[in-house]
Image (cartoon, rainbow, N blue to C red):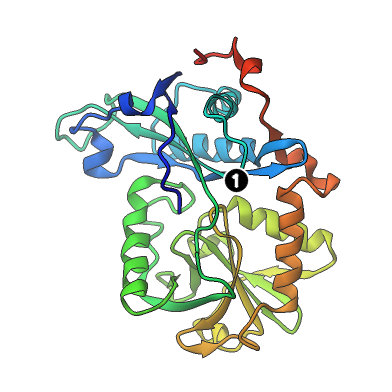
Amino acid sequence: MPTEKPKFVWMNGALVESEKANVPILSHALHYGTGVFEGIRAYKTRQGISVFRLKEHMRRLLDSAHAYMMPIPYTESELCEATTTLLAKNGMNDSTYIRPIAFKAEAGISLDFRKVPVWVAIVALPFDKYFEKEGGLNVCVSSWRRIGEPSLLSLAKASGHYINSAIARVEAAENGYDEALLLNQRGFVAEGTGENVFIVKNGVIYTPPLSAGILEGITRDSVCTLALDDGLKLQERDILRGELYRCDEAFFAGTAVGVSPIVSIDKRVVGEGHLGPVTRRIRDLYSKVVSGDDERYSHWLTSVRPAAAYSKVRGAK
């Protein structure tokens, strides 16, 4: 997990020292969760550090904000440029986690946020592994259900949604598991606390559809694309809880976790209890793509130029 504090962050259109990037205690988002965010990764490639699917992430950020009536005063291209500028300014040259966030800032205590200004910030941190454990994850099905429509907008990546994930993750950890899986309100498999889930049965990959109340993961989309392009069979459909206990393989996919194998669910061993052949194939394909070693997907990578190249960019100082 990232621990090193960056020297600079990007906030409200400018690069500022992280110590000066302060948020008011009466920020609406702090009290009511009125914010949207993204998790993005940059990887070391032969061409230098490159950000994976930067445009898609920023487009989802804007879509999430639009869905919750929180207009962001920056374009997709401005947010992308701000991100690469920030990475260059901080001298990032290895694996990095990037967190853009837009949130309702200074306000009183009213729930009506229409007139509350939207602040936007981007933070970048050195990042290696989300799960420290090697060899695969021991997972439980949480007692908590995945929140979703019609109570809230499940396709939006909103700050307030993640209290649901947090209590599920803590419950799993308290009971000795590495991660949790949540079922949706209909009782079908939804997702992990911060990842989409896939299972494999008889050589076919299955993953829940958007109608299951899941986040439309960008890593999920990447995995689906890679699997189909590589000739693997993949289906999006509702998955019963019982199918988790009968599958040959299972894995998570997400920005922070990449492709992470699951070796047990509710103390039932998955398959042979180790990384399976389909999961290995997907993980290897994904690793090649994010490292820039598969030219077919080079359009998914945004290179970060030297800091001097951004001297005229908005927000650079």
- State the image coordinates of residue 4 (x, y, percent, origin top left): 43, 42
Mark 1 highlights which residue? 95
Is 178 located above or below residue 291 in the figure?
Answer: below
Q: Specify the amino acid type for callout 1.
A: Ser
Q: Nearer the viewer, residue 289 or 239?
A: 289
SS for callout 1: loop
- State the image coordinates of residue 272 (x, y, percent, origin top left): 65, 88
- How many marks can you see? 1
Which residue is the extreme one toward the top? 312
- What residue is shown at x 77% (from left), y 41% (from top)? 46
| Quadrant of the rendering where the N terminus is positioned | bottom left
Q: Nearer the viewer, residue 59 or 296?
A: 296
- What residue is shown at x 35% (from left), y 27% (from top)? 118
Which residue is the extreme one toward the left? 109
- State the image coordinates of residue 12 (x, y, percent, origin top left): 40, 21
Q: In which quarter of the image is residue 75?
A: top right
